[in-house]
Image (cartoon, coloured by chain):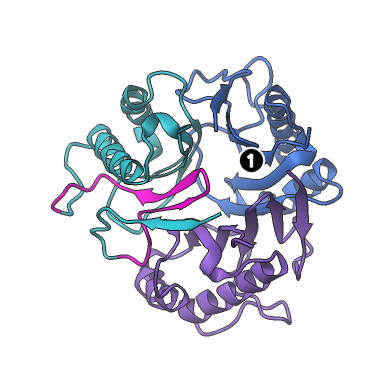
Chain colours: A cyan, B blue, C purple
Amino acid sequence: MKRTTINVQNSEGLPLSDAVRFGDLLFVSGMVGMDAAGKVVAGGIAAETRQTFRNIAAVLAAGGASLSDVIKVNVILTRAEDFADFNAAYREIFPTDPPARVSMVAGLTIAARVEIDVVAGLPES
Amino acid sequence: MKRTTINVQNSEGLPLSDAVRFGDLLFVSGMVGMDAAGKVVAGGIAAETRQTFRNIAAVLAAGGASLSDVIKVNVILTRAEDFADFNAAYREIFPTDPPARVSMVAGLTIAARVEIDVVAGLPES
Amino acid sequence: MKRTTINVQNSEGLPLSDAVRFGDLLFVSGMVGMDAAGKVVAGGIAAETRQTFRNIAAVLAAGGASLSDVIKVNVILTRAEDFADFNAAYREIFPTDPPARVSMVAGLTIAARVEIDVVAGLPES
């Protein structure tokens, strides 16, 4: 199968593709709650979570998928105490049939409170 | 290919599916050593590891797979000093042809000493 | 599809396969900058990064793939301050069309400064 790189923003200038498609799978890079100006949005964990998924949705769209095609979500929170508010915002993103998910508390290489990477499956065409 | 969510327990009430199947792949959510009553089992890392894999096996079974179909295992330990005892218990789970694996030491959003998520490949039918 | 385990080195004697192939996908275990003698190379993060990818490339080759087939890279750094030097070494590995990637700062179960696991897609044959 063919490997295709997908780039939408990559405003951090890092050596990565926003996503890589292989066959029917789309692997999206870790995304944070950065706005179009390249700044992590203010407002705390809920605002960052919503912006992170806006960024993920834009990358998925460029790869031919949408949030409803997400299979697996990997979540890195920098503060365990953000978990409840994170989940509240997350429920709005995936109101039904949510993806598989794993969450952990670790450090990030950017000043954000959450980073999320996903795997999506291309919808049937 | 079709995306199918699989739910067995999810006793934490979190916004996630226990697993999502896409094509021949099954992505299982991060699981901990929780028993049927929703409590993380006592007895330390070996007991938690065994219970975690009981939970993973139940989800795999609901998705049409078993532990011998696991391709990749992602391990989060909260204490580096648990690694040797974790490995001893882990060897019992995968006595031969073990999956690919990565292990790290990080925090969890639940009071457990280990959390594990896996990717499995549906057996040939 | 068939699940095949691939073993090249595994000098740590851990209960894992260096990689598992399933269909066109190759899941490689977390690798560190260990040399043939089983010691993590000296010289800091750049040297460890290069050695880690030498080890990954050897496993990929045994599975029928190469670094240019890597779809997704998961990076664990133990020190956030290594990120810039890590990226400089990383750019040499993937000069064009880099994989999707996520990076975090967490602990390892071995005395290394970086651990990396990858997913690759088998090239078209």
Left or right: residue C94 compared with residue B28 = left
- The image position of residue A62, as x and y in percent, is 31, 46
Residue furthest toward the top? Answer: B37
Q: Is residue A19 left or right of residue B102?
A: left
Q: Which residue is mark 1?
A: B118
Q: Choose between B75 and A54: the one closer to the eye.
A: A54
On the question of residue A83 being in view, the answer is: no
Q: Residue at x 18, y 43 (%)?
A: A41
- Start and end of the magenta stretch? A14-37
Across and down, in percent, residue B18 comes to: 58, 26
Quadrant where the C terminus of chain B is found in the figure? top right
| Quarter of image, res C85 | bottom left
Q: Position of residue C36 (x, y in %)?
A: 72, 81
Q: Indicate yes or no whether the magenta region holds residue A26.
A: yes
Q: Chain of mark 1?
A: B
Q: Residue at x 79, y 40 (%)?
A: B68
Name the residue rendered at 17%, 52% in the picture.
A39
- Secondary structure of residue under mark 1: strand
**Does the segment drawn in magenta span residue C56?**
no
Residue at the extreme bottom of the image, as rendered: C43
Direction from residue B72 to residue B108 in the image, left or right: left
